[in-house]
């Protein structure tokens, strides 16, 4: 049975924003390894459209960007959207029954399936379907933006903490 994991970079004041701060080279390499090892990712429409950046080679990419793009392209992707009619390579649109679709993914696969984006994670949290939360805590204060927990805060239990690179700490929680 697959494990559903929601992990994102977060500011000290609880916000996620891929444009406000980026992982350093060491942390980015960690994310490459994560992507290489994941069974797949579940995306909401907005996050999927952001991540489509990795579908096409970009001028100036270094070795790490190429490695991440290769891992992302190989990975299975499931997209939750009411407006998209089609998706790109290795991607499948999920039906309107979000809970049923995620339960089927968990039952039909092994390994880790990443949840990409706080809005989708909020929906899956409300349904009790996220097995682990990984917060990559950056020493940055944003003061506004999209919160990591976009809805009710679930009761959690800390299961691991790791210094990742520089001043970034990964906190891993499971539902309590």
Image (cartoon, rainbow, N blue to C red):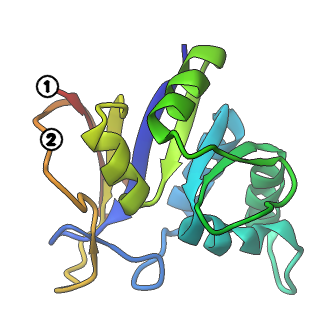
Q: Is residue 120 left or right of residue 25?
A: left
Q: How many labels does the image show?
A: 2
Q: In the displayed structure, would residue 101 be above or below residue 50?
A: above
Q: Camera-side residue: 43 or 171?
A: 43
Q: In the displayed structure, would residue 157 be above or below residue 139?
A: above
Q: List x then y, in percent, for residue 37.
A: 66, 33
Separation of disc 1 and disc 2 at Cα?
A: 8 Å
Q: Camera-side residue: 85 or 17?
A: 85
Q: Which of marks 1 and 2 is nearer the N terminus?
A: 2
Kindly identify the residue that appears in the image at 51 percent across and 39 percent down: 97
Q: List x then y, in percent, for residue 3.
A: 48, 24
Viewport quadrant of the C terminus: top left
- Residue 166 seen in render: no
Kindly identify the residue that appears in the image at 41 percent across and 79 percent down: 21
Kindly identify the residue that appears in the image at 63 percent across and 74 percent down: 50
Q: Name the residue under label 1.
A: 176
Asked if disc 1 and disc 2 are in contact, CB closer than 8 Å, the reply is: yes
Mark number displayed over residue 154: 2
């Amino acid at each position: 049975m697959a494990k559903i994991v929601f992990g994102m970079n977060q500011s000290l004041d609880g916000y996620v924003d891929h444009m406000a701060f980026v992982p350093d080279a060491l942390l980015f390499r960690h994310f490459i390894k994560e992507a290489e090892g994941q069974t797949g990712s579940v995306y909401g429409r907005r996050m999927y459209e952001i991540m489509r950046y990795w579908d096409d080679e970009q001028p100036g990419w270094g070795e790490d960007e190429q490695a991440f793009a290769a891992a992302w392209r190989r990975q299975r992707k499931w997209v939750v959207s009411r407006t998209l009619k089609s998706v790109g390579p290795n991607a499948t649109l999920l039906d309107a029954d979000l809970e049923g679709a995620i339960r089927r993914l968990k039952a039909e696969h092994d390994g880790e399936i990443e949840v990409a984006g706080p809005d989708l994670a909020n929906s899956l949290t409300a349904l009790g379907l996220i097995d682990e939360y990984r917060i990559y805590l950056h020493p940055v204060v944003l003061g506004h933006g999209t919160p990591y927990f976009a809805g009710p805060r679930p009761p959690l239990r800390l299961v691991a903490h790791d210094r990742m690179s520089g001043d970034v700490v990964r906190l891993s929680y499971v539902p309590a």
